[in-house]
Amino acid sequence: MTRRYLLLALLLATLPGLAAPARAEPAACAVPDDLALSGLALPAARAAVRHDHHLTILAAGSAPTAGAAAHGVAFTYPARLQTRLEALLPGITVSVINAGAAGATTHHMLRRLGADIGEAKANLLLWETGGLEAARGSDVDAFAAALRDGIDRARAAGADVILLDLQYAPSIVRVVDAAPYRRALEGEAVSADVPMLRRYELMQAWSEAGALDFDVTTGQARVAVARRLYDCLAAALAPAIAAAVK
């Protein structure tokens, strides 16, 4: 296993420490205007909300989606997103299904993406991916092709798509060249006309503002940062999704 993969795994993988408290810590992460999602077009999700009063979201991804770093399912970003959307969409049944799996690459996720959407009857896919490819130096063109295929499969299964780009941490930036994979993500998002949460830049902004320290080393502090981060991501996604489906 390479040094760069180990450093990336530090942020992505399960972190030891604190036992889960009764509720998540409140987030205090401002979203800069130029990084905020706005004016989303989510026709499948909007139709489901209007006709069936139900919003079903499948959150696909690797360790950050699975959220073991936060030591508790209730603190994952999909769980926090469901709580926030329920508050923003009274009278609508909201289900955010966590399909995250540690160690899952884009190609691994692709194998079941359409089937998972169909089984869940999801009308919106949130797809975070690319971190493992960047850490391993995987072929960028193959990564882009898998993204393209996944977006097509999601749409064929009746779901809208929002992409989440790579994570940021100062220690990772020093050893992993994420730029080609971030460009591939952005390129596929633009080409397929799907929105993308610029997670990397958001996390960088929060880091530089002192809101979150992604290079903490103690177990308890790392769990606290993971919980705060996941709630911040949910807070960045929820208002845009709610506005798009009303």
Image (cartoon, grey):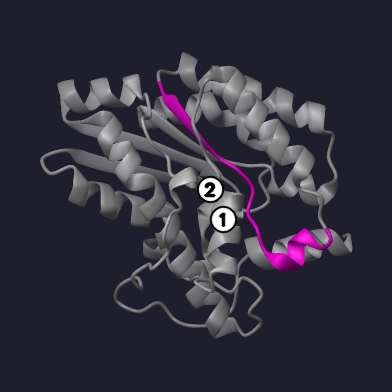
Q: Position of residue 72 (x, y in %)?
A: 43, 68
Q: Residue furthest top?
A: 156
Under circle 1, the secondary element is helix
Q: Position of residue 231 (x, y in %)?
A: 40, 61
For disc 2, the marked residue is 100
Under circle 2, the secondary element is strand
Task: Write the residue at 64% across / 25% down.
Answer: 188
Q: Callout 1, which amino acid?
A: Pro
Q: In the image shown, does 32 or 131 lie closer to the viewer? A: 32
How crowded pointer 2 is (Cα within 10 Å; few <14, some 14-19, many 20+) is rated as many
Is residue 99 highlighted in magenta? no
In the image, the segment drawn in magenta is 159-175
For disc 1, the marked residue is 64
Q: Callout 2, which amino acid?
A: Gly
30 to the left or right of 153: left
Distance from disc 1 to disc 2, alpha carbons, whole Å, reads 8 Å
Q: Position of residue 34 (x, y in %)?
A: 49, 44
Task: Name the mark on residue 236.
Answer: none
Q: Quadrant of the N terminus?
A: bottom right
Residue 211, above or below 59: below
- Count of marks placed on residues: 2
110 to the left or right of 145: left
